[in-house]
Structure formats: structure tokens, C-alpha cells
Amino acid sequence: MNPKGNQKHLTFQQCVDIEKGLTENKSFSEIGRMIGKDPSTVSKEVRLHARTKERPDPGYTNPPCAHRKKCKLTCLCDEQCGTLCKICRKPNMRCIDICPSYEVPECKKLLKLPYVCNGCTKKTHCLMQRTFYSSKYAHDEYRSVLIECRAGINQTPQSIQEMNDLLVLLIKDNHQSIGHIYATHAEELGCSRRTLYSYIDSCIFDVRNGDLRRVVRYKKRKTSTLTSAKNRSYRIDHNYEDFEAYIKEHPDTNVVEMDCVEGKQCESPTILTFTFRNCNLMLMFLMEDQECVLEVFIWLETVLGQEAFKRLFPVILTDGGSEFSARTEMEEFCDGTKSTTVFYCDPYSFWQKGVCEKNHEYIRYIKPKGSTFIDLDDDKIRLMMNHINNEKRDSLNGHSPYELSLLLLDNTLHEALDLTAIAPDDVMLCPNLLK
């Protein structure tokens, strides 16, 4: 019975069994039954991978000619010696070098089964060229062909040029990510994402690894040696463990992560961000200093209305920075009624609000670390916010935060903050956006 599994390729052990069977003068049918293959498969394997083996003995440097028995040629050396050239013993008189009719003999047995000399009894002293089937050589040749046929670029020069033009525009000019590009141009690219990364790594395009966002790894983060800060009064009953207990009791509650992004050191403008966990939509507000957080809350209450605010911001998770210490004021509307519930992450545990931290990377694509925020205004902040929210992401299954927010959030938010859609090819996340 033939073994189960993929029977398309011969294994190395099967090649060894074929070589052993040929040495023992077994027929192709017997070898086929032994390895579970058809005799025609064995025949094709032997003829495909049979090779002429070089003779190691130095006496074979002048092998006999195929016409040696009938050869009557003399005086090929122009000395008129009258001696038959085939029996001449002069060192420089080799038929292979001087005779125009020299022909290497071929064994007629190689024209019929088994096509090789593995089982021949005369192989040790035969003067003709010998052909053998070697399992190691056959398997190495098979592996080489298997690898080579999958190597290289499976594209035409025209398709490569079209891909290059598209990638240069979207990556080098607009600084878009590969994930965003595939969400809108997968059919035009005509290859998998892994293949595209390989093409870029092989310098097939004008785009290089340095033009991609995350190909260059980040430096290893330093481990903080500082001890955790003691809980302050405004954090009592509002720590991260309290947040986990609250979410366990109210699993359907939408969580909004809040944080600040600072510009160049010792400069006042900062950006306050709100990130909705359910759709990754990020709101951005420019503040003159970190004490203006309450002003943003009052402005949101005014433009959204109290009911819309409570639907959009039922729970807010932030860090324990001093700018967020006014928890009581943030949790109440101007008339003193309850607006939201604020919880605080543990010290040095930025991963507890990872969605917000990840979204801050998009801000840094436009305003790198160390750059100033002095040149920003509300219009530029709105422009940055719309471009970031329209970036299609793998984590959202190829959709953008803006697209999901239209389905999951109160659209009053979009009207109040002027959140708009941007064409995929126009999305730009680089400093040139603000120029």
C-alpha cells in the first residue's frame, strides 16, 4: 500500500532506496514497490539525475577512441615514422589532442534500462565514460531547482514600474504606511504584503527601508529605577484596579483614554488628546499650558451638550500627571451634575492606556520629538487630526478610525469638531503636511 501524504516529491530516503536498488540490479518495478512509487517515476528520476562521473585514475587522461579497432591512421605527427598513431608511445602523441576523428566511446548499455552503471560488474575497470545515479547529488539538485524556481521577481518590467510610481508617491511623498496603502491599492500592487517588503528590501524600487516607518527598530527602552509615586488624594478609589472593577461591572461601557503630548522642552504649548478605544478615533486640542484641561472640558460640554457628552465620554482613563489632578471638576458639568468618571493608570504603566500611546506615534510622524508646537494653531491641529483619523490600519481590518466612528459614535461629535473624510491617496503623515 502506498504511504499516505503528499506523493508529489521524492524524499531523500526514497532517493537512497533507489540508489541501493540500482546497485543490487533490481528492476524499476521492484524499486517502485519498495518506495511506494510508480516504475515510470523511478525511470524519470534516474534519467533526470544521472550524471557522468569523472575518473580519478590519471591513466584515463587519454581514453580510448570509439574507432580504435578500425583506426589505420599514421604519421599525424608529420615525422613519417610509419607507426600507427593509436599505438604510438610518444608523450606528446595523444589521440585526444591531435586526431580530428577522435570520438569518446559510449557504452551501449546506457541506452537501455537501467540507464546507469550502478549495478554493472565492469564499472571498476571499464575504460568508457561511466554514468551513475547518486542519491545525494539527486536530492541536492532537486533542492536547488526547488529554491531557484521560487526566487527572483515574478513581475514584468512594466508592472514593476507601475508599482514603483505608486509607492514613491504614497510612501516617499505622503509618508503613508504599507497597511494603509494595501487597504486601498491591493489589487493594483498585485502581490502580497510580505512580497512587497521583500522587493523593497532587495532595492527593486526607488523606495528604501529607511522610507518605511517601523522597519528600523526602536532603541531598547531603559528600565526605570524610580520607585512608584504614592497615591495622591484625587486618585483614591480611582486607581487602575478600580477601573478594572468598574469595567467588569459595566462591560459595554465605552472607554476614552486621555493624555498630553508635549512639544520642545521648556516651551508652553501642548496637545491634549482623547482616544476612543472602540474605534481608535483621536481628538486633539491645542493648549497654551497644561492648566487648560478644564477649559477643554467646558468647551466640549458647550458644543456637544450634556447628553451627547455623557454618551461619548462615560469613562475617561488617564495618567496621574498634575494637569489631570482636578478630578472632581472634570467629573462635573458647570451646573454641578455628574458628567463622567475619571480613572488613573498606575505610575510608569503607560501600557495601561496603550491605544492612546500608539496613536501618539502618528502625531510624531508629523511633529517629531524635539520639534516645537509654537507654530501650531487650531486649523493645523484640525488638519493633523483629520489626516491621522483617516489612516487605514491593520488593527481595524483595513478601515480608518474615522470610518468606524461614523458607525460607533454620536455624529454630533463630527459636526462639532469638523471631522471630515480625506481621500486615501491624499492622506499625508509627515512634516510636509503643515507646510
Image: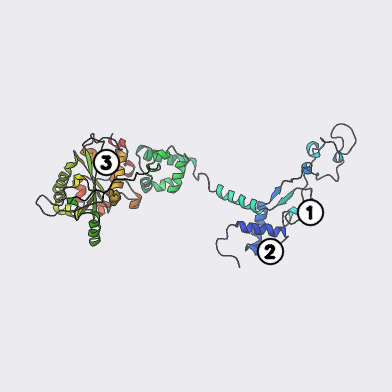
Mark 1 crowdedness (10 Å alpha carbons): few <14, some 14-19, many ≥20:
few
Query: Is residue 422 something that shows in the picture?
Result: no
- 102 relative to 245 in the view: left or right: right
Q: Secondary structure at mark 3?
A: helix
Query: Is residue 61 something that shows in the picture?
Result: yes
Q: Which amino acid type is shown beneath numbered disc 1?
A: Lys
Q: Which amino acid type is shown beneath numbered disc 2?
A: Glu
**Between discs 1 and 3, the one toward the N terminus:** 1
Q: Position of residue 369 (x, y in %)?
A: 30, 38
User: Where does label 1 land, which residue?
Assistant: 122
| Residue at 22 percent of width and 46 percent of height | 321
**Between discs 2 and 1, the one toward the N terminus:** 2
From this viewpoint, which residue is outermost toward the top? 79
> Residue 30, labelled with which disc?
2
Mark 2 → mark 1, Cα distance in angstroms: 23 Å
Give the camera-side residue of 226 and 277.
Answer: 226
> Residue 384, labelled with which disc?
3
